[in-house]
């Protein structure tokens, strides 16, 4: 049986966070090593947070 302590080892906190800064309004993502199909992510305006890829959780933020 898996305990709550075991689940923490598999959370997103266990992996380094990746943030990509861009000047574009949309950007293609296929994972850091082409690990998933290419998807397009809409990047919000500066100051409106970030967009996150649904496959690999890479975050995209607008560069200043």
Image: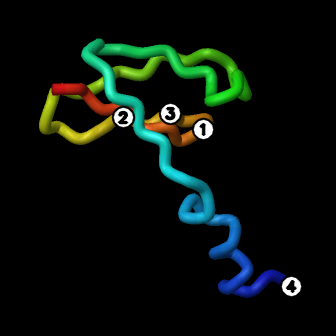
Label 1–label 3 contact, CB within 8 A: yes
Of mark 1 and mark 2, the one earlier in the sequence is 2
Residue 55: x %, y % from top left: 61, 35
* Real-space Cα separation, disc 4 to disc 1, in angstroms: 27 Å
Crowd rating for badge 2 (residues with CA inside 10 Å; few <14, some 14–19, many 20+) = some
Residue underneath mark 1: 56
Crowd rating for badge 4 (residues with CA inside 10 Å; few <14, some 14–19, many 20+) = few
Residue underneath mark 4: 1
- Pick whichever, 64 or 52, lies toward us: 64
Residue underneath mark 2: 51
* Real-space Cα separation, disc 1 to disc 2, in angstroms: 12 Å
Q: Nearer the observer, disc 4 or disc 2?
A: 2
Element type where label 1 sits in the image: loop
Vertical position of residue 58 compared to residue 9: above or below: above
Residue 58: x %, y % from top left: 50, 37
The image's colour scheme reads rainbow
Residue 15: x %, y % from top left: 60, 56
**Which residue is found at the position 70% from the left and 27% from the top?**
33
Quadrant (top left/top right/bottom left/bottom right) for the N terminus: bottom right
Element type where label 2 sits in the image: strand
* Real-space Cα separation, disc 1 to disc 3, in angstroms: 6 Å
Residue underneath mark 3: 53
* Real-space Cα separation, disc 2 to disc 3, in angstroms: 7 Å
**Which residue is found at the position 62% from the left and 21% from the top?**
30
Quadrant (top left/top right/bottom left/bottom right) for the C terminus: top left
Of mark 3 and mark 4, the one earlier in the sequence is 4
**Which residue is found at the position 50% from the left and 33% from the top?**
53
């Amino acid at each position: 049986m898996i305990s709550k302590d075991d689940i923490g080892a598999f959370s997103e906190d266990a992996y380094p966070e990746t943030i990509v800064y861009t000047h574009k309004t949309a950007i293609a993502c296929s994972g850091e090593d082409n690990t998933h199909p290419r998807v397009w992510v809409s990047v919000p305006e500066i100051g409106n947070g970030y967009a996150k890829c649904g496959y690999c959780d890479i975050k995209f933020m607008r560069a200043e």
